[in-house]
Image (tube, rainbow, N blue to C red):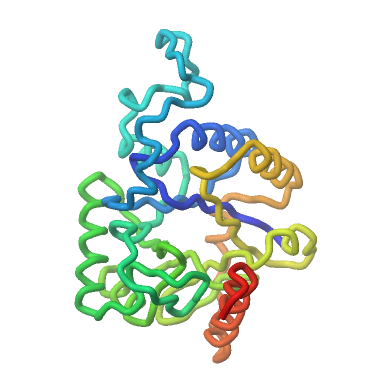
Amino acid sequence: MKIVIRLDDFSPGMDMGKFRRFKRLLDEYHIKPLIGVVPENRDPKLDAFRDEPEEDNKKPKGREELPDDKIREEDYPFWHLVRNLQSEGWIIAMHGLHHVYTTKKGGMLPLNKQSEFAGIDLEKQISMIAEGKRILGGHGIATDFFMAPSHSYDKNTMTALAENGFRRITDGFGKRAYRRFDMTFYPISFRKDAVLKDESEGYTTFVIHTNTLNGDDFAYYEKVFASGKVVSWDEWLLEEPAEASDLQGIKEYLMARFKYIAVHKRW
C-alpha cells in the first residue's frame, strides 16, 4: 500500500515553525503533499499561533543568518507561500470557506458531529463554495480539489461542488480513487498502523495537522517517510479512478460511524 500526505488547516494563523519543520522532512524525502487551504479563516483555533515565535527562532538573528526555509513571516506572506508551494508541485485543496462549524451533522462520512456544510440547503452551499473559490482566485490560486472541514459533507455539497467546477475530493475510505456523484474521491486511511503493514496494491492518504504535532509525532513521520511507502500526489493522480460500487456509501458510513464510536466511546 502506498501512502500520500495531506496537511489540513492551512491558514495565515497556523504554526509556521512546525509547518516549516515538517516541510524540511517532506523535502528531504522528495514528497509533495496535498494541503487544505482555508480561503477566509474565521476559526479562532486555527488563528491561535499567529503571534507565536518559531521554536528555533525565538531570538531573531540577522537575515543573512536565516536559512531559506526560515524567512520570517512578515517577509514571506501567507498567500505568497501558498503560490510558491503550488509551483513546487504541491497540490492545493480548498478547505471549506471559513472553517466554522454551523451544524452538528456528520454527513455522509460521520467521523465527527460537526460541519460547515452538511445539513445546509443547496443554494447556500453553492454560494459558500463559490465564495471560497473566488477568494482563492483573488490570491492567484486555482484548484478543483476540495477538502471538507471535519470530513463532513452531504449530497448537497457534492452538487454545490460540481456547480462550481470542483471535480476531486480528498475523503472516503478504500484502496484506490473512485468515482461517485460525478466527483473523484481520493480515500483517507482508516487506521495508519494497518496501512503501514499492508503490502497489497493501492493508495491511501495520511491526514496530518501540523499545528498540533509534537516531538514524538515528528519522529514517527520521519520513520514513516524512511519506510519508502510514501509517494507524492502526482503519482496517484495518474491512476485511473474506479467506479464506486452501489455499496460504497453504506460501507463508508458504517466505517466512519464505527471509528467515531471507538474514539468517543458512545453512540
Point 49% across, 71% down: residue:
185
Closer to us: 47 or 35: 47
The percent coordinates of residue 65 (x first, y second) are: 47, 9
Query: Visible in this render: residue 13?
Result: yes
Picture quadrant of residue 25: top right
Q: Is residue 225 left or right of 30 when viewed as pictured?
A: right
Toward the bottom, the furthest residue is 246
Numbered marks: total:
0
- In the picture, the quarter occupied by the C terminus is bottom right
Point 74% across, 42% down: residue:
223
In the image, is residue 107 above or below residue 237? below
The percent coordinates of residue 107 (x first, y second) are: 43, 78
The percent coordinates of residue 264 (x first, y second) are: 59, 69
The percent coordinates of residue 173 (x first, y second) are: 59, 73
Query: Visible in this render: residue 234?
Result: no
Picture quadrant of residue 59: top left
